[in-house]
Image: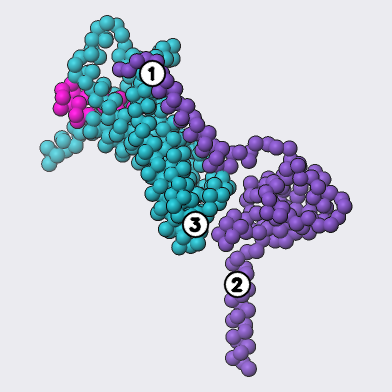
Chain colours: A purple, B cyan
Amino acid sequence: MQHTSTQDTLVGLFVAFGIVGLFFLALQVSNLSSFVEQDSYTITANFENSGGLKVKSPVSAAGVKIGQVSAIKFDPETYQSVVQMSIDSRYNTLPDDTTASIFTAGLLGEQYVNLEPGGSDEYLKNNGKIEITQSAIILEKALGQFLFKSAEEKAEGKSE
Amino acid sequence: MIEFLQYLGKSTRISFTKLGRGTYFLLQAISGISGVLPRPRLLINQMYSVGVLSFLIIVISGLFVGMVLGLQGYYILSDFGAEETLGVMVAASLVRELGPVVSALLFAGRAGSALTAEIGLMKATEQLAGMEMMAVDPIRRVISPRFLAGLLSMPLLAALFSAVGILGGQLVGTGLLGVDEGAYWSQMQAKLDFQDDIVNGIIKSIVFGFVTSWIALFEGYDAMPTSEGVSRATTRTVVNSAFSILGLDFILTALMFGDN
């Protein structure tokens, strides 16, 4: 048995390391750090199709993350997807004719909302709504259209 | 035929009585925890032998498991041009499965077997009986502190294992294979959820710590008081712990990650 105080120190070190490990997992590995509520304001946008967008997907402008998706709902009247985003209140100078589009980061990456500021002098306020939107590109749809088109062209070539 | 039936009946009866003794033992050990809290010295001694002495093997294994995951993951992911998701793969597999499971298996081998041998030898040399003679409850004095120490150490060790493994994967991925470091971390942070992944991993490791400490202590306490009995009990601890960890892991995974 070692001297008691040495043992105390080692046990203390062990527990401290364990807790550091837990914190590392919580803050560095998972998305807990983005839960830390900063002052934010909410804007919404209606999309024809929000594709694979999820709650907590990033919202970025010019490639910089400025907020995240806070809720996605289906509007039973317009049959559109209503995406609610909370934007960091540091960035409160988005014009009210901003365009929102859903992009994919890389071919296999996650989907995110890209905001492209317009030229209006009025800024988007809390609970403001983005009017101009562009839906997610659904890969299956695009592929289907492409295949359909090429089949059509082939058929036309034969009949001539 | 009759002999076979007799054998079957006997072994069923024996395993059920053992299960009953084990459950009773567990309840005693848990109720004895209240006696440990006013005397933290007992707990610290056991935290030292259960936790601190397992520290090195956990950290080194975690580092190498993470590094191997980084290498293997890179080879497969680069076929799809998705090297950037290496961080997600390494972190998710460590936090969800490998961290709790491998550290629990190592814990059973390193600390569980030591606990069984210690308790079994105490029983064989009649130290436990001696304590009872002096009106000291051996469960409260010997078993409960060890049980609590195992229960507390396991989640810390599993968290360390995962954390070191993720760093090891980063070492290989970004240092050796040239994956972008920013992508490694940002994809990981985007895909891993605190509630779904990390908390569930910690819950797993607490369950494993509970089961391994229970098995190790009970096997020691229930060992035949001979040198052969102690050696058998030690073997049983490692084997039964491994079975329970892997079986429970399947059940817990099915319950936790079923809906996504």
To which residue does mark 1 refer? A6
Q: Amino acid at mark 1?
A: Thr
Residue B70 located within the stretch drawn in magenta: no
Span highlighted in magenta in the image: B213-233
Q: CA distance from mark 3 to mark 2?
A: 28 Å
Local crowd size for mark 3, using a 10 Å CA cut-off: few (<14), some (14–19), many (≥20): many
To which residue does mark 2 refer? A144
Residue B223 located within the stretch drawn in magenta: yes
Q: Residue furthest right?
A: A121
- Magenta: main secondary structure: helix
Q: CA distance from mark 2 to mark 1?
A: 70 Å
Q: CA distance from mark 1 to mark 3?
A: 45 Å
Residue A78 percent across, percent down from the top left: 76, 58
- Compared to residue B83, the image places residue B235 above or below, namely above
Q: Chain letter of disc 1?
A: A
Q: Amino acid at mark 3?
A: Glu
B51 left or right, relative to A79: left
Residues tagged by mark 3 and mark 2 found on one chain of the structure: no
- Picture residue at 37% right of the left edge, 15% below the top: A4
B199 left or right, relative to A7: right
- Residue B83 badge: 3
Q: Secondary structure at mark 2?
A: helix
Local crowd size for mark 2, using a 10 Å CA cut-off: few (<14), some (14–19), many (≥20): few
Q: Chain letter of disc 3?
A: B
Q: Amino acid at mark 2?
A: Gly
